[in-house]
Image (spheres, helix red, strand yellow):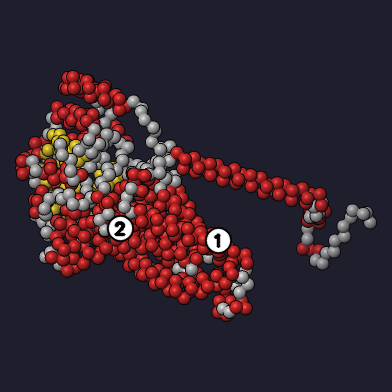
Amino acid sequence: MAPSSVVVTIDKPSNISLVELAESDMLFEKQKPASTKQVSWTLLLKAHRILCLFPYLATLVSKTLVNVKKRIAVANTGTTDEVVYKERLMYKFIRVFLAVSVIGLVVEVVAYYQQWDLDFIHEFNATNVVGLLHWGYMCWVSFRGEYVAPFVMMLSQFCVVLFMIQSFDRFILGVGCFWIKVKKIKPVIDGEGYDVEDADNVPMVLVQIPMCNEREVYEQSIASACQLDWPKDRILIQVLDDSSDEVLQVLIRNEVNSWREKGVNIIYRHRFIRTGYKAGNLHSAMQCDYVKDYEFVAILDADFQPNPDFLKLTVPHFKGKPDVGLVQARWAFVNKDENLLTRLQNINLCFHFEVEQQVNGHFLSFFGFNGTAGVWRIKALEESGGWLERTTVEDMDIAVRAHLNGWKFVYLNDVKVLCELPESYEAYKKQQHRWHSGPMQLFRLCLPAILKSKISKWKKANLIFLFFLLRKLILPFYSFTLFCVILPLTMFIPEAELPIWVICYVPITMSILNILPAPKAFPFLMPYLLFENTMSVTKFNAMVSGLFQLGSAYEWVVTKKTGRSSESDLLAFAERESKSLNEEKIQRRLSESGLEMLGKLKEQEAPSGPKKKNRIYRKELALAFLLLTAATRSLLSAHGIHFYFLLFQGLSFLVVGLDLIGEQVA
């Protein structure tokens, strides 16, 4: 037999074909084991690939640290906003909490490597002690289990109860929205709408555009208002300019004059004494003698761009309904896909308008006025006391007072008005501070009036417990306390551990409910959840400042705009006058003073001064290091989901603290 031959035993030769026997040699040839040299080369190749990964990761980490260091070096530390405020106590509390956590982490690391077993606590005697540090650790574990853990558990259980109540409220709102969608419920107009061709039967409408140093958006806002489809002799547009920039005042006045020359009934108003912010501006405008000739007033902030049919879709809802005081339209955003920050804002506001406003408008005929993109019956404003300057949320203030006086509200989810979202974290943070401190100011002021009002007990309970306490106070309180204080604390006090369903399942479920009105944003579910917890420090800080009347509660900062427009707006405004024409109008109308203004305008347009830089936020950075410290402690205990939550939440705080989210200016 040849050395290379193969012996094959066939039990059932009828089941095997000749072709299979002929290829058997090839089959055995392929199954020969690889040589030792081949195995060695394969292992070396895989090891080389693994080793090449480490330099790549090291380079990536190094570049990240360099960028972070550069950002901190050039960033504005925010001394005017973060340190001057009277809420320094929170920042000091976070720093102390961080220092104690770092010390606790060091002790836990020592205990981990010393392999001290916690079971010896039950047999605490001198024979178990192997040193002074060991004895101190035994005393700390015994003390925390007997005294600290019960208090933390009580606080955590209280926050969990608030968490579940708020989650139940969100669920009920979601069910209400689903019912409206299924039943296709929409506000209806009694009879037919107004025929704008028959001007005699069309009500008089006043359109107000309050603005303050809105250089980027004043042209498009005025142009949008001037193109509203309403009889020219039945509408008056008030441009209420509170700008402190003299050059900008001239530009806005010229823009108004140019539209007046085209036949638009529009006037320019500027206050010499600019008090009360937006509320003072609106109150001053309503004192004009000619206002008594108008029945309705539409309010449009400077960055809002209504469609020409805005009044035709909103004003008819007052017809035949003398008890309706407000018709509110929905906001739509021209820059919702600009960056991650605007995408996350869009999720929040879509839920607010699609669910909260729509459900409350249908079932309660009451919701918080959004401050713009709404039409008021002037009689409702006057009977409710008009615009007051006592809080920074004048829109919510007038809505609550009108509700107490028996006026009903109508919300139109299908009527959308374009506007902008803040593209930088600095602008968004200031906006959220005002939106969450103002309601607490208002709650203190309105509580006696709510209790004394003649509305039903159900409406009183809705205002106090749902509108104010649950949605304005409890939400930021439990979010900050539960996820930014108690959760990292339980990593060092394992006897008070939070259950997984509180950390993971319920928040994810509620986030899914929040994201349903904006289904295209579903891939951003986890960033949204982490970002909302990150914003809790700002909201909690604002809530405390408003509730206890601290200094920053009275600050009213105009949200920064960029002047973005939709594609249709760009086409509509393509024939607007150029910058050179504006300069010629300044020269022609103002003579020598116009030349002086023109010189100021050119000076402002020339680049001067240091370039604006991104900022760093101390509270967010301190909380980032606190959560990462707690994540390291949870890693020693193999807490699982707790570690991942703390890790990613800490990283999200780090990103926000270094101002790496939203618009980047440096």
Q: Residues within 10 Å of mark 2 (few under 14, many from 20)?
A: many
Residue 12: quadrant of the picture:
bottom right
Q: Residue at x 18, y 52 (%)?
A: 390
Amino acid residing under circle 1: Val
**Above or below: residue 608 compared with residue 356:** above
Going from the N terminus, do you reach mark 2 or mark 1 first?
1
Q: Position of residue 621 (x, y in %)?
A: 44, 51
Q: Nearer the viewer, residue 313 or 274?
A: 274
Residue found at x 42% / y 57% = 94
Which label number is shown at residue 544?
2
Q: Residue furthest front?
A: 132
- In the rendered image, residue 85, in percent from the top left (x then y), is placed at 32, 50
Q: Taking the image as drawn, is residue 501 in sight?
A: yes
Viewer-proximal residue among 254 and 7: 254
Q: Is residue 312 above or below residue 216?
A: below
Which corner quadrant of the image does residue 277 belong to?
top left
Measuring 60% from the left and 46% from the top, which residue is drawn there? 57
Q: Which mark is residue 106?
A: 1
Left or right of 147 on screen, residue 50? right
Instruction: Give the side of residue 628 with respect to residue 400, left or right.
Output: right
Total numbered labels placed on residues in the image: 2
Q: Secondary structure at mark 1?
A: helix
Closer to the camera in the image, 125 or 146:
125
Q: Report whether 50 appears left or right of 177.
A: right
Task: Residue type at mark 2: give it.
Answer: Val
In the image, which is nearer the foreground, mark 2 or mark 1? Answer: 1
